Image (cartoon, rainbow, N blue to C red):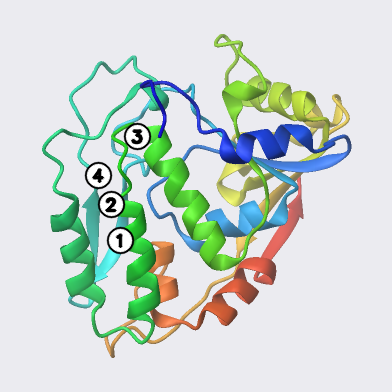
Amino acid sequence: MPTSDTETPLTSTRDALRTPLRGSTVGIMQPYFFPYIGYFQLIAAVDLFIVHDRVKYTKKGWINRNRFLQDGRDALMSLPLKAGSDALDIVERELAPDFRRDKLLNRIGEAYRKAPHFDSVFALVRRVLMFDDSNLFRFLWHSIEQTCRHLGIATPMVPASALYADPALAGADRVIALCRAAGATRYVNPIGGVELYGGAAFRAQGIDLRFLRAKPFEYPQLGAPFVPWLSIVDVMMFNPVAEVRERVASAYELRAAA
């Protein structure tokens, strides 16, 4: 178990930094709590997945919360955080001391207890929620690792701070710096980044910018009208793991940047 509040997870990091990365494809994201399927498609589509740890935690985002199915509707479920300054980075934030892990686990369990693949997926959810670490980054890192293992995704992960340490960089400059540090020649970003990043700045650095769009995936949800784009937990609860793995591996489009 890590020994300090800001120590970075090292299990995947050592393997990732030992691997030759020149000419690789990378993806870069903040850590999220059981994110939607597109997040894992991004991880599966790249040679190295870089996880932001030294960026500011943002409220009302998806870092410590996500949408799950409850009584036929989407319901927001969150990891409560210890009060802290808005200036703190993700790796400096902590789960609330009074966080009832069992209570959130039971809520998810009750919501999905009739799902066809409940047993195996609920075991994963239990491993994640009961992980004995209060540091937000390490907790989320562990959850991503465990979910990738369940889905058979072998892409190595590395914290962004292991590749560069210039806090002044932001936006496209930060992304390009990380790509160059990793020796990447292609960067894949979720489709929402079309409005944020232009291809010219990346091409000038010898980096091919692509955008990943997850294909819609509709499936039965206990007889209720389908609610799309929920947490990956919802996808896994209602679909055989082999089918989920197949969709993670191929049910997306890569679009070239303008």
Q: In this view, does 58 lie above or below 115?
A: above
Q: Mark 1 points at which residue?
A: 126
In the rendering, at what x and y percent does residue 235 appear? Answer: 44, 72
Q: Distance between the residues labelled 4 and 1?
A: 14 Å
Which amino acid type is shown beneath numbered disc 2? Met
| Label 2 SS | loop
Q: In which quarter of the image is residue 180?
A: top right
Disc 2 target residue: 130
Q: Is disc 2 surrounded by few (<14), some (14 to 19) or many (20+) residues within 10 Å?
A: some
Amino acid beneath label 4: Leu
Of marks 4 and 3, which one's residue comes earlier in the chain? 4
Q: Mark 4 points at which residue?
A: 79
Disc 1 crowd rating (10 Å Cα; few below 14, some 14-19, many 20+) is: some
- Measuring 88% from the left and 38% from the top, which residue is drawn there? 23
Query: Quick check: marks 4 and 3 in contact, CB under 8 Å?
Result: yes
Give the alpha-carbon distance from disc 4 to disc 3, as whole Å: 9 Å
Percent coordinates x, y for residue 206 in the rendering: 88, 30
- State how far apart marks 4 and 2 are (Cα): 12 Å
> Of marks 4 and 2, which one's residue comes earlier in the chain?
4
Report the residue marked by disc 3.
136
Q: What SS does tag 3 mark?
A: helix
Q: Residue 143 vs residue 242: left or right?
A: left
186 sits left or right of 120 in the view: right
Q: Marks 1 and 4: in contact by CB < 8 Å?
A: no
Which residue is rendered at x = 60% and y = 72% of the image?
245
Say if residue 258 shows up in the picture: no
* Badge 3 amino acid: Leu
